[in-house]
Image (cartoon, coloured by chain):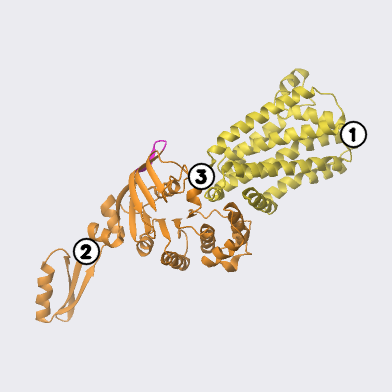
Amino acid sequence: MITLTQVTKRYGKVQALDGVDLHVSPGETLGLLGPNGAGKTTAIRLLAGMTPPTSGQVRVMGVDPWTQPDHVRARMGVLPDGAGLFERLTVGQNLQLFAGLHGLGAGSVERALAAAGVDGLTGRRVGSLSKGERQRVALARALLHEPELLILDEPTSGLDPAAAAAFHQLIQELRARGRTLVIASHDMAEVEALCDRVAILDRGRLVACDSPAALKAWHGRRAVRVTVARGAGTETLQWPLEEAAWIEAVARYRAEGTLLAVHTEEATLAEVFLQTTGRELA
Amino acid sequence: MRLIALAQAQLLDMVRNPVVTIFVAIIPVLGVTMKLAMPAGTHEILASLLFIMAPYFVSWSLTAQTLAEEKEKRQLEALFLTPVRPWQVVLVKSGLGTAVSLVFGLLIPLIMSRAPARPLLWFGAYLALTLFAVGFGTLMGLLFQDMRTLAVGGTPILLLVMFSSTMSWVMAKPGIWDVQVWLPTRPSMELLQAGYFGDGAPVLRHFLVMAGYIALLWLANARLVRRLSFAGR
């Protein structure tokens, strides 16, 4: 669905992307994780054909989006950062505009609004909507032409937890329907919950790309925590998962009858990010 | 179909935009109020003022301000994620600006209760000024990235272009007139005077000067439109 080969993008002296190789298969959900300025939005602009790479090759659905933007945009929906809706128009008028630009009939508007769960907002002016509602309307706009590929740039940025959770549910439904998704975010919990694979970008470089579980297994700390009875109280002991010592200890405490609990502890994506980039995700 | 969808949305947005409404409505309101308040002998100056202000105010609000606002609110970016081309967006905005300006141009003789002495010449002069003003408004909208910088940086330029060659017109010495007739706005002003009041003017030369400025503006706009899809980066 998407292939980036040694893609570099430079804006003047700023190196936005540096030798990025990336592949996204049909039906997959890929998370682009990184702080502001990591190159996530630049990657999205390249995929949408809004800018050419300085060097390297970008292919979306088999074609170069810069030279064949219509081919790509007809099959790709984008939810840009900052919904970009016309605030003085109603929800319905906004979607009718974009349906017209895609050459679609009126039926597509109702279908997209229903898919994004905002069919009750058709007559409301966008300026009067909450941020969560606007994001849903912007998602409906991205779904108008029923794209195979959906790109979401910071989809829940600035949303309250309830609105973000509702939006996540919507994304899960899209995943279940087999859509290919690329989600750019700096929210690690969001990326971990929604994505099959996570590409970590840092200062324009792709520093890691794998499933959240694999990333945590390879780059993060995994530990075993053993809780045992000590007199009237308890004590918690900890070993790295890779060390065999905890197996002997668990067997011994079990034989003594003091073993209370054994937990494994996984690294978080935040720790993975710290380990792969040497700094925390702001 | 794309152009129609864009034009419909732009018109709706324009009607609901209080800034645009005030900018556009100021012309007929000002015209009627001043005509009632000013003595009949000054109505020629008033008509001349309205003929200059109408195209500039309309194009400023419909092209410069809407382009800057749509860049600021990332609406242009959303548009460019569809098959629409940047030049189509600019074409619709400038087309609407031209149409609204022409409507207001036709209103001015009604407000002044006086038909043009040479209607064709008057209309040609007003159309030339409208095309220049729309091109200028588009240039400002393309150059400035948001409403604030447009207001701070663009408004003085608008006032300079609109009035530098026309406000001192009555008082300036003949030597200064010789320079002013080569600046934008003034040739249209003299053509409008000739068409509306029947005054004399070097018609061909003035039209050629305005045509030169219009061509230059739209060439500059064409270059900027090619870069428009990267707005807001």
Observer-side mark, 1 or 3, equals 3
Q: Which chain is orange?
A: A
Whichever of labels 1 and 3 marks the residue nearer the N terminus, that label is 1
The residues tagged by marks 3 and 2 sit, at their Cα atoms, a distance apart of 43 Å
Location of residue A35 with respect to A56 vertically, above or below: below
Q: Measuring from the top left, give residue B4's x and y in whole percent.
A: 66, 50
Report the span colored magenta.
Answer: A11-18
Observer-side mark, 1 or 2, equals 2
Residue plotted at (61% across, 65% down): A122
Q: Can you tell which quarter of the image residue B172 is in?
A: top right
Magenta span: helix, strand or loop, mainly?
Answer: strand
**Neighbourhood count class around disc 1 (C-alpha, 10 Å): few under 14, some 14–19, many 20 upward:** few
CB within 8 Å, label 1 to label 2: no
Kindly indicate whether the residues beneath marks 1 and 2 are on one polypeptide chain: no
For disc 3, the marked residue is: B232
For disc 2, the marked residue is: A222
Label 2 amino acid? Arg
Q: Circle 3 sits in a helix, a strand or a loop, which is it?
A: loop
Location of residue B84 with respect to A96 vertically, above or below: above
For disc 1, the marked residue is: B41
**Does B208 sit left or right of A219 as displayed?**
right
Label 1 amino acid? Gly
Q: Chain of mark 1?
A: B
**Does A115 sit left or right of B194 as displayed?**
left
Label 3 amino acid? Gly
